[in-house]
Image: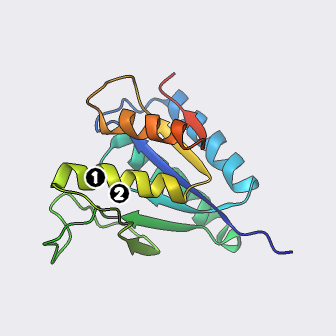
Amino acid sequence: MIEQDKICSCFGHQKVEITDELRAEVEIAIDGAIKDGVRTFLFGGLSDFDDLVYDVVSERKKKSPEIGIKRVFCFPLDRDLHKPPHWFERKEYEALEVPAKSFDYWYTSLYYRNCAMIDMSDVVLFYAEQRERSGAYKALEYAKKAHKSIIDFAK
């Protein structure tokens, strides 16, 4: 029986102080995820933490291309989306996707995109402090309720 590749997503606050210690912890977590079969990494692209994870995953992809790492940017669904949103930073992604759940206004589209990413994931990386109005914190609470494997670097 062939085991299906696993998926990892990441979420964090928009502004995160990226220290050498945090980077080292993320590198260990990414290496462990890859060792455990993660091959697809999902990104939302709205935080310093996302950028850190993207950079580490890209380094691993470049160092070991035979592993077959895939980086996927996940847009929030926008009923009027005819071009990428102004905040989309073009990087090298192997795919662009719109994981969809229904929503009623733009902010909820981000929340439901995050929930869809978490639903697809086997492992979820967070930098989420307890801030009730934070999208990263709301995603963390959703991942806990979904019983996902979680690593939160904000602790």
Q: Quadrant of the N terminus?
A: bottom right
Q: Secondary structure at mark 2?
A: helix
Q: Residues within 10 Å of mark 1 (few under 14, many from 20)?
A: some
The picture places residue 135, in percent across and down from the top left corner, at 31, 39
Vertical order, 139 against 70 (above or below): above
Q: Is residue 24 left or right of residue 138?
A: right
The picture places residue 86, in percent across and down from the top left corner, at 14, 61
Q: Which of 64 and 100 lies nearest the eye of the viewer? A: 100
Residue at coordinates 60% horizontally, 44% vertically from top-left? 148
Vertical order, 75 against 124 (above or below): below
Rounded to the nearest angstrom, the CA distance separating label 1 from label 2 is 5 Å
Q: Secondary structure at mark 1?
A: helix
The picture places residue 71, in percent across and down from the top left corner, at 49, 66
Residue at coordinates 53% horizontally, 32% vertically from top-left? 152
- List the residue tagged with mark 1: 110
- List the residue tagged with mark 2: 113
Q: Is residue 31 visible?
A: yes
Residue at coordinates 19% horizontally, 57% vertically from top-left? 87
